[in-house]
């Protein structure tokens, strides 16, 4: 219980249901003196916002965030930062059917049995709408990390069967897919249009990269940087897999191939994804995540109701045919939150460590 | 910092370096009244123990665990359980070279820069020897979970390029690979023999399954059961990827294919791996993990020393050519610890929840 | 850092400055199914509210609380409960003087040096206004504890030099002092009127009692029930001392006098205040707390400004001449939060413990 | 549950029963590079050790501590420090009576009902013997704090009815009472001798002082420095009250008297005990604690057995007639642990804060 807090020193606690009056968060432990405005948070919220292309849900929420505390005269004060987004577009008209049925592969069944009750309107707490507050909090972390020379960015690396090459950061934010290869866009558009005609949904793979991370972040043996990243990324709705660096490719690799050799000029490769022994190596930290296809499709599916009777479920409403499309800002947020928490943890223990060995450049 | 504790209610805190006087752990929060003896812990420790076949390190440690507290007259008392294993086979003779060099793809470089110092003997704290205490603590969790009808087991599902079919639990513990397909054994043996001749190492994939898990475990939105599993499994040495259920296969799946439909008789499939919305569904909880090839190989590799000079490193000593071979009991331990922690957390909040809906059987 | 969360399983995280747009809290870990409405919270908020008599600050805030999540159709759902109170009566007109001066015995000096900045309007985060959210969260705990047969109540046991006898709970809530002896009221009124004429302030002692607490709450050796109570009560603004049971009187007691003997009918006394070895004994849990006189008085005091220059400070504005007067509901809240957290913790570990020994009645 | 860890960043987790094979602790989060040897810990352990005068228990334990990890070549490495003390003088011969009876005012009754079982030999986990590990861990904190210019010391300020003046630190460690007034010693000796003849026990008051604490430690609103100190000190066996600065004397004080005025040369008084708004002010941090008289006396007392029958209990064995006498090193340890944890927490958030305002000297 009380599982709604992320982080140990730099913590984010969230609340809010899809169709309740508001979503909110408390960001605690932010260092004082950081320049921060609502516009800084809004930028990433707008990147995640639904309704921005025909490939995402047509629910339209302005998702206007308010900062309620912790910022004074344009700078953080070191006290907790209260955030709130009011829900404005909840169409809660007719939920009588969904109230009694479990949509297959949704959290309806598990929430019902865990709590004995649930707010069934729009998925309640289990709705991906909750991730808006992660993005808002993540924007604070990004702003602070930027001041430390750390940049966290993500992109879509696969949409359904279509693998996407990374051709550069330019343009990633200019298309609705966060696609890093402009040449792939027509193919992605065509795939999504067909998917809608098929009344189906599909999975996706997202890659997140942090550059400028200093060597030394991560607290073995349990709070390794990669372990906490895995926690954060796997906690995103619909995520079923997390990889660091080469991920599952390492299974078939040999040691002579995998090991990232070093020279005085730097690492010669980055199979490790920037983490060695649970501690950042100074190379870019690279993670991949797999998002499942949403189960909210209009094809009928077999299920049961709360009384145990067989029912046929058709999920109507406004849904994303590929929840992965909007997941890039959320994944960035979770990586940023994790890195900031670890940077503060490292600073606590090793504030005055001085090492003469030269740090290596990044491969 | 202080990253050496796992769990929130049922917690394990460990200490110990590879070549120090002892390894130890404190297991806190175990319910009273559980029958427990050192033999219960020793069983799993023996499964993980090095030197049990020619395919693992030839370091020989009896790994004899002692229970120092928390058990009285054969039963747990509810007070913390102190565990200790004395190190007996530390050959700390000549470390002058390793003390000044960073072995590529090891934690030498990152520990040195994080802490400004390190116990370089045998990898110190970053050695996989640390996982012995996880296995000992995990055995306590397994014993308690067994009393709740929950069983946690694992097997090797891939060794390097060789995928292994799961043909049943029988025999898994009778071969040094934890291989669930007796017919594959000759191929695995041959592969490993060749690998040693090549003076190389290789990765592996492990699968862990928990059966009998009740519906309802997991604390959204951050402490989802799958997120905490990912944390636990990714915190194991050499792990670079974690999957729940279909894992990265979901990327190319369609919603109509992925969703596990339900009938009054039960789920019709388990693509989700037993977790929906971060909460256990009552189906078997299934996780996969990818372990990298160890970098401790006798082929020379390029690296630097602590002064920044180029050096050529050859890792001698006694090492596992495939660290994945001994990882199965460790992965089981981390899943057992996670499940027990979550079962207690669930019980705290929902001790008296009564739901009339029939639970579904397991697919 | 991140010190704005109280509790381990049943947690309260708060935000908000005295003169910011709003105060808020997230209550996480509340069991599902609890009947709860805003009116339930408002009752205690009104007891704490300023401006209810001439003996408290004349600042007038309706302190109207809103529940933003976690409650559906009148009952808690097990998801986090978001709470908010908008600030309506912030007169932030002229703070130019206070912005540069440290009021003696206030947190101005320490906040300034800790964070390098501070929201000086009305004390910012250090204002006792923050305690409104504790009271709101505490009301949730009280409601749940009531369902377990546990009642938490408090009263004023001393005002400045005037010790107050406890003559019964009746009438405690009917006077502005939470005074349990109606005969003392005229004396208290006269004392306060003279205090205002003296332009001075005074301390107070509050007693909180929990009845119906089962035997067994508390998690030795560090998270003893009394230790966590001391944490919670000492975290209230202006508190300088906490006692359990006989408190500092035990220093001069002898063992033969202090020990609470037992008979089959129950304990014969309650010097221990309901806690033995850090665990509740089934007797009433009794705590006392000492609140200092506020330093916000209109008599000039010596201090310095942020540049280190000597200044003479006169604290104007609307202040309580005895902050202890409104502290009773706050102390009740902290005790209720502590007990509920511990009841859930106990249930997690010992959900199924059955003991045949008869519990003793309460002395 | 899992209440055996103290601290958030610099954490101490302990295990061990009075008559089990060993006591132990894991100290996690210690910065690397601290010079540390077993002798550094032994010094404080010897100050706490029983049997050092005729006024304490005659149980004789060498209490020889071993460091099992986390220290390499005489310095801490940043990894967890494992500590162990083997129990050598457990006379567990005949406990048949105590096994079935609840000694009045002991934890027998509450442990039995909480856990349904208990290790009754010598009090098991509830024995004050547990505090040996606190002292060992506290010595690590003291060593590190000393490097930061912070010194934590304590003394007895009252023994039963005899208040003791503080006349200086010199000589405090040279008498068995930690008495800061040599002239009081004959009176204390005489009182204790009479107490033994009376077959009774008595309470005591201890004062702990930390000097050199920088301004800024403490994390409002819940993890105030004084609140965490109250937690730590109240968690010591037999403590029933905690005060910061003037403590309960503030109840009768006026604001004009209590407020510590400031001049450019420093604070003019220290009624606050070095904490304002939950944050250290740079003045000495002063705390007082009240220890109850032990209930282990040879005068018969009324109680019940585990079947609910009335019994008469006489506590034999080797006990301290005043547990407060040996409490000074324990109180110092808890204050040192708290300060170190908070210093690291402060450093995490505010590592780079620079304030131009001159810090004030200490009153």
Image (cartoon, coloured by chain):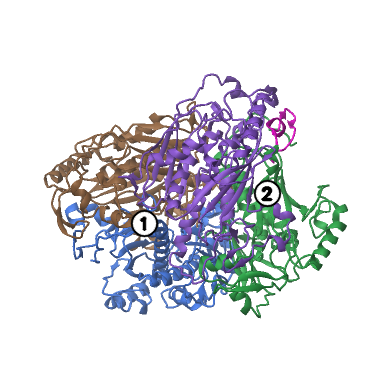
Chain colours: A purple, B green, C brown, D blue
Asked if residue B27 can be seen in this view, the reply is: no
Report the residue at 49% width, 45% height from top.
Answer: A5
Element marked by disc 1: loop
Q: Pick whichever, B199 or A129, lies toward us.
A: B199
Judged from this view, the residue extending furthest toward the left is: C197
Judged from this view, the residue extending furthest toward the front is: A183
Q: Is residue D72 depicted above or below B235 in this figure?
A: below
> Does residue B260 show up magenta in the picture?
yes
Mark-to-mark CA distance, 1 and 2: 40 Å
Q: Which mark is residue D218?
A: 1
Labels 1 and 2 touching (C-beta < 8 A): no
Q: Is residue B232 depicted above or below A62 in this figure?
A: below
> Does residue B28 show up magenta in the picture?
no
The chain holding disc 2 is B
Q: Quadrant of the C terminus of chain A?
A: bottom right
Q: Pick whichever, B215 or B270, lies toward us.
A: B270
Q: Pick whichever, B69 or B28, lies toward us.
A: B28
The chain holding disc 1 is D
Q: Which residue is mark 2?
A: B145
Asked if residue D192 can be seen in this view, the reply is: yes
Report the residue at 43% width, 40% height from top.
Answer: A41
Element marked by disc 2: helix
Task: Please tell me how crowded label 2 is: few (under 14), some (14-19), or many (20+) other residues with Cα within 10 Å.
Answer: many
| Left or right: C345, with B63 as reference point | left
| Left or right: C306, with B45 as reference point | left
Range covered by the magenta-colored residues: B253-273
């Amino acid at each position: 219980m009380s599982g709604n807090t992320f982080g140990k020193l730099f913590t984010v606690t969230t609340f809010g249901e899809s169709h309740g009056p508001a979503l909110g968060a408390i960001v605690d432990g932010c260092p004082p003196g950081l320049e921060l405005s609502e516009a800084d948070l809004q930028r990433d919220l707008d990147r995640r916002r639904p309704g921005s292309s025909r490939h995402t849900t047509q629910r339209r929420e302005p998702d206007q965030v308010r900062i309620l505390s912790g910022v004074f005269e344009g700078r953080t004060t070191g006290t907790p930062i209260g955030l709130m987004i009011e829900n404005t577009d909840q169409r809660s008209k007719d939920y009588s059917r969904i109230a009694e049925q479990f949509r297959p592969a949704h959290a309806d069944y598990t929430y019902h049995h865990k709590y004995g009750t649930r707010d069934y309107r729009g998925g309640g707490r289990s709705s991906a709408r909750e991730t808006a507050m992660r993005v808002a909090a993540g924007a604070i972390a990004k702003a602070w990390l930027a001041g430390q020379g750390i940049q966290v960015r993500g992109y879509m690396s696969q949409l359904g069967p279509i693998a996407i090459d990374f051709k550069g950061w330019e343009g990633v934010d200019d298309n609705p897919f966060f696609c890093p290869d402009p040449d792939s866009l027509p193919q992605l558009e065509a795939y999504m249009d067909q998917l809608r005609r098929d009344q189906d949904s599909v999975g996706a793979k997202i890659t997140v990269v942090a550059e400028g991370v200093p060597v030394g972040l991560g607290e073995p043996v349990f709070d390794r940087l990669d372990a906490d990243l895995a926690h954060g990324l796997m906690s995103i709705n619909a995520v079923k897999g997390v990889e660091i660096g080469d991920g599952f490719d390492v299974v078939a690799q040999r040691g002579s191939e995998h090991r990232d050799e070093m020279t005085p000029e730097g690492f010669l490769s980055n199979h490790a994804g920037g983490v060695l022994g649970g501690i950042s190596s100074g190379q870019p930290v690279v993670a991949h995540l797999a998002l499942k296809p949403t189960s909210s499709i209009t094809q009928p599916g077999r299920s049961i109701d709360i009384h145990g009777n067989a029912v046929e479920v058709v999920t109507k409403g406004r849904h994303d045919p590929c929840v992965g499309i909007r997941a890039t800002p959320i994944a960035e947020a979770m990586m940023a939150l994790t890195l900031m928490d670890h940077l503060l943890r490292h600073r606590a223990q090793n504030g005055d460590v001085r090492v003469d060995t030269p740090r290596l450049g990044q491969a």
